[in-house]
Every structure is written in C-alpha cells, then in structure tokens.
C-alpha cells in the first residue's frame, strides 16, 4: 500500500510541475496558447487518470484487507 501511495505522490508532483509549465508556456507565447498547451493538457489528463486509477486500487486493497 505504501508503494502505491508513493507512486501517487510522485505523479501528483509531476502534475503540479506540468501545470506550472503549462502556465509558463501560455505566458511566454499568448498568441498561440492552444498549440503549446494541448500536448501538456493531454499529459495532465493522462496523469490525472493514472492517479485516479491508483487511488481506486489503493481503496480496493484497503477494503480487501
């Protein structure tokens, strides 16, 4: 269970960094924010989905004991 929590924590940190990076890229080039942020948004969505899946597995492992 602690391994899952560690992985979730690492992914949460990545998510935070990607969010900051996305904001910085938008500020650097405001004329094309969609072009810059689209790949980052896809990465954010993937990481969020993985975190949700890990949290779900974590809850299931707690319920099973």
Image (spheres, rainbow, N blue to C red):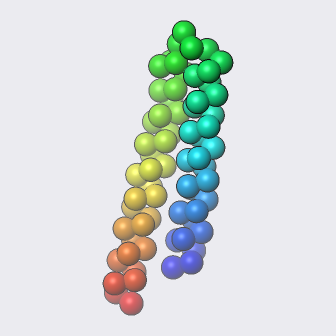
Task: Choose between 27 and 4: the one closer to the eye.
Answer: 27
In the figure, 38 relative to 43: above or below? above
Task: Choose between 53 and 12: the one closer to the eye.
Answer: 12
Give the image location of residue 50, x and y in percent: 44, 55
Q: Quarter of the image holding residue 3?
A: bottom right
- The residue located at (64%, 28%) in the rendering is 24
Give the image location of residue 19, x and y in percent: 56, 39
Give the image location of residue 12, x and y in percent: 56, 55
Quadrant showing the C terminus: bottom left
Task: Choose between 32 and 57: the one closer to the eye.
Answer: 32
65 horizontally vs 41: left or right:
left
53 horizontally vs 7: left or right:
left
Q: Residue furthest bottom?
A: 65
In the figure, 6 relative to 33: above or below? below
Give the image location of residue 11, x and y in percent: 56, 55
- The residue located at (43%, 42%) in the rendering is 45
Q: Quarter of the image holding residue 42?
A: top left
- The residue located at (55%, 47%) in the rendering is 15
Q: How many marks?
A: 0
């Amino acid at each position: 269970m602690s391994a899952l929590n560690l992985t979730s924590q690492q992914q949460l940190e990545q998510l935070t960094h990607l969010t900051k990076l996305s904001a910085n890229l938008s500020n650097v080039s405001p004329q094309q924010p969609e072009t810059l942020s689209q790949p980052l948004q896809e990465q954010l969505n993937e990481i969020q989905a993985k975190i949700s899946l890990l949290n779900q597995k974590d809850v299931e492992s707690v319920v099973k004991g």
